[in-house]
Image (tube, rainbow, N blue to C red):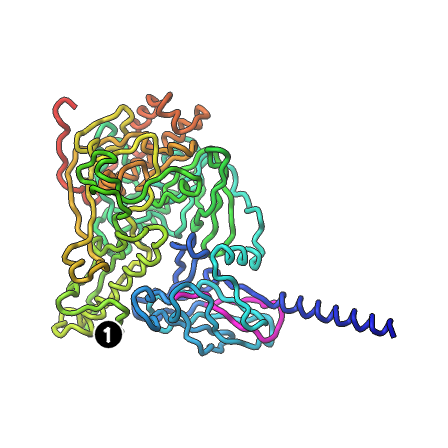
Amino acid sequence: MRLILTIMKIKIFLFCLLTACRLHAADYLLEAESFTNKGGWVVDQQFMDLMGSPYLMAHGMGTPVDDASTQITLPVAGTYFIYVRTFNWTSPWHKGKGPGQFQLTVDNKRLSSPLGCDGTEWLWQAAGKITAKKPQITVSLHDLTGFNGRCDAIYFTTEEGKIPPTDVSALNSFRRKALKMPDMPESAGQYDFVVVGAGIAGMSAAISAARLGLKVALINDRPVLGGNNSSEIRVHLGGRISVGQYPELGNLQKEWGPTKGGNAQPAANYEDEKKAEAIAKEKNITLFAPWRALKVETDGQKIRTVVAQHIETGKELMFNAPLFADCTGDGTIGFLAGADFNMGRESRADFGEKTAPEQADKMTMGASVQWYSEDKGKPVGFPKFAYGVEFNDKNCEKVNMGEWTWETGMNYDQINDFERIRDYGLLVVFSNWSYLKNGMKENDAYKNRALGWVAYVSGKRESRRLLGDYILKESDLTGYVVYDDGTAATTWSIDLHYPDPKNTANFPNAEFKSIATHNTIYPYPVPYRCLYSRNVNNLFMAGRNISVTHVALGTIRVMRTTGMLGEVVGMAASICKKHNALPRAVYQNYLPELKALMTEGVGVKGLPNNQQYNQGGTLKEPPTGK
């Protein structure tokens, strides 16, 4: 009898163990960005630091996009409950169902639940259940509206109600385990110099260093290069090159800068292919795109390793080098490494800046979602779109396009609130256009027009500014206080943006238009000490995240200027390699060598400066005797 009971207990134990194993084995996590066929959906990685992952988005400007699809193999055949991580993106402004609706299709069976239109945050939404007769299935995302429905991940489980965590930290741990990601990323190789960010500044830093003999890794989190000057954002190159003490700086941009100017113009104007070819032909540069740098490992006051993740496959790589350059715009690498930084506006007393506010605050210049419409020659409809921002004949914008002045988020955190900032940019574009098409009585000027392009990658002006051994301030610029370590000349006026009072009156605390104030300056050589971190000893920076005050950022932030500063960083990196030195030592011990390199330049000489660009106003002549 005891033997029989023992055998029964063993059978029960084995049955429970087998059942538990089956339930565990039947869980499957599908990351949406990994779909093999994206259809009309786009990969959006802009907020993956905050919400844990890139996602797919149906950016159809009011027209449903083509289905995205992929094939997967579930652990076993059987009945699965499906949960989708999604977000009702208009919920900050509109209570009720949102416009970003889509459905899930599994093996040609469309599940009934509309997704993406409920809740107020990123959440796991029940999508229904399926019975898979075989483990191999095809999964598709079917867009219903064209209004930016978004899907982060799809979770299949045999246990109803079992969903992954919602907390981002716990969810990241869950993802790593579910996707069997290794604890140690694969090495990308050893480099002399790692540049993170391939906007104009990062491209220039990488090419400059490569031509001076360094082995360079260039990491960019989008598939196209150029940052704000790419076809994804479409901002013209601003500022002047070939001026100041070192006129050979800027020659690189003559090689691959677009010949046409203007904001919010057709994609071809920004010549993405020319930028890609410029990087591809440099034998000392290895490009990693699209990879987003997410982690930094330090050794004392130095960066040892940067870890980057592919925005579609999720694979991680680690990059080791003695020198790094943060050209991310947001100062991401510096922030992760513990670099000192400022964000927002300093007080007038902090640096004696007359343009600064009396009290320091968190206000920044905003981010722009640019757009334009096209005349189709016949009437074109547009869906009614009203999700919390009301337009009428008095407050609507009667325009055919929107460029830099369509600027949002000045009073929000440009890092932690950036998805909200971008989404509000989309919301007001669609809401205003809907009113012009459907609500305004005298709208003959708009009947034949359709949205031709709306950016979903937002053009950001300001966030973190990493602090160097010197912080450039307003009185340096306006008083022409030139230092011995002056480098490339900034030429743009001190151009600071503020909420447009008229727009604020129409939309209190929800403005989406800006004005700019300009203070013309002399061509001013930016000190080299602004281009490296004061407390992360092997970190350079180039771009809008260099060591300046908010006011001084108004001039150095334009791309022709940041590109030249990138060239200088590449030159300084070559000196560091030559002498086995750190960035600060270039200023302390090797400044004559840097000056010689800046005098010679690294670009092809003699090319015409024939690009159409915005110069930023009439320059003042340097004061007599200076």
Along the line of sight, the residue nearer the viewer: 385 or 446: 385
Disc 1: CA contacts within 10 A as few (<14), some (14-19) or many (>=20):
some
The number of numbered badges drawn on the structure is 1
Residue depicted at x 34% and y 30%: 469
Q: What residue type is labelled 1?
A: Gly
Magenta stretch contains residue 302: no
Q: Secondary structure of the magenta portion, mostly?
A: strand
Residue depicted at x 45% and y 54%: 311
Residue 510 lies, in percent from the top left, at 23, 60
Along the line of sight, the residue nearer the viewer: 558 or 300: 300
Going by the image, does 264 lie left or right of 165? left
Going by the image, does 279 lie left or right of 254? right
Determine if residue 104 is in view: yes
Residue depicted at x 68% and y 70%: 19
Residue at the outermost front position: 359
Residue 618 lies, in percent from the top left, at 13, 39
Report the residue marked by disc 1: 381
Magenta stretch contains residue 86: yes
Residue 521 lies, in percent from the top left, at 16, 35
Determine if residue 204 is in view: no
Residue 424 lies, in percent from the top left, at 29, 61
Q: Quadrant of residue 584?
A: top left
Q: Give the range drawn in magenta.
A: 69-87
**In the rendered image of this protein, does residue 110 appear above or below residue 248?**
below
Q: Quadrant of residue 403?
A: bottom left
Q: Which SS class for mark 1?
A: loop
